[in-house]
Amino acid sequence: MRPPRLRAGDTLALVAPAGPVPADLLEKALPVLRGWGVEVRVGPCVKASPGSPPYLSAPDAARAAEFTEAWLDPGVRCVLAARGGYGVQRMLDLVDWAALRAAGPKVLAGSSDITALHRAVDVHLGLSTVFSPMPASVLFDDFAQEHLRRSLFEPEGTLVVRGGSALVPGRASGVLTGGNLSLLAAGIGTPEHGSARDAIVLLEDVTESVYRLDRMLTQLLRSGWFDGVRGIVLGSWAACGDPADVRALVVERLVPLGVPLVEEFGFGHVASSPTLPLGVPVTLDADRGTLTFDAPALT
């Protein structure tokens, strides 16, 4: 099910379901969001002092309550994560998913650690979501801002996303899924793990050694997560070691799957990242380096 698009005058809730939010980046981003013609409600965890442990924006219960209250607010049309970091998995079991389902559809946007929340909204609510740059980030540049805005307000204008080059040529169609590799691997065995069957998969990560990327890909492969995958789109591997070593790993572990595979597509932990909707049908043309969405991500 696709949520409704945003319109001028709507309310956007900014939340912090993972790590602490840098105050300087937040203050820089707020005028940008308000310039879209929406009311921005900043959640209490967004401006909170770091929790205990200090890599969390607030205690688990507080972060779960912030997210839940934003979703249940009938005036809120979009819930946008201010940043990633770590912590989403810790709060998932504290969210009243039945109440959120009863509240009806709205947009979830974010990336990185928010991958766990995308998976949860997919599994528990059956909604498409938006894998997007986040405002409290140095990577929230002019391109990222405008592509996110268009994806939320004018999704017909973002039906084709172009980038990267083919490692395995070909063309395939399926529902777009995936996100951050670390979170996908960490979700194996949880209620939200899902699978890549009949899907086009997005994969990216940051600050992970090549051997750790190897371990995560191997875990997904051995668990059967990739069984039935139709295509793979690789984004950024920022600070993950020598790009040649990462590429060699991908060639060894993913090319044998025999499905269309594109590298360096330009999304993830990188400047000028596009917004990519999850849970909607898409066609990957590896030879042309394009993702074409069959329909707008939002109604």
Image (cartoon, rainbow, N blue to C red):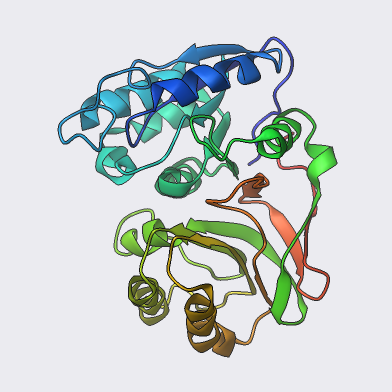
Q: Is residue 191 above or below residue 78?
A: below
Using the image as rendered, state which of residue 9 and residue 205 is in the foreground. Answer: 205
Q: Where is residue 235 in the image (x, y as percent from the top left)?
A: 59, 61
Q: In this view, does 209 lie above or below 205?
A: below
Q: Where is residue 118 in the image (x, y as percent from the top left)?
A: 48, 45
Tell me what residue is drawn at x 42 percent, y 79 percent.
221
Q: Position of residue 68 (x, y in %)?
A: 38, 24
User: Which of the 4 quarters of the picture holds residue 131?
Assistant: top right
Using the image as rendered, state which of residue 220 and residue 234 is in the foreground. Answer: 234
Q: Is the C terminus in the top left, top right, bottom left or bottom right quadrant? A: top right
Using the image as rendered, state which of residue 15 and residue 174 is in the foreground. Answer: 15
Exactly how many numbered labels are in the figure? 0
Q: Where is residue 208 in the image (x, y as percent from the top left)?
A: 37, 64
Left or right of 42? Residue 231 is right
Q: Is residue 158 above or below residue 263?
A: above
Q: Can residue 14 be seen in this view?
A: no
User: Which of the 4 quarters of the picture holds residue 104?
Assistant: top right
> As drawn, which residue projects farthest toward the left?
52
Left or right of 187? Residue 28 is right
Tell me what residue is drawn at x 44 percent, y 22 percent.
24
> As drawn, which residue projects farthest toward the front?
242
Tell me what residue is drawn at x 64 percent, y 36 percent.
141
Using the image as rendered, state which of residue 114 and residue 82 is in the foreground. Answer: 82
Q: Is the N terminus in the top left, top right, bottom left or bottom right quadrant? A: top right
Q: Is residue 112 visible?
A: yes
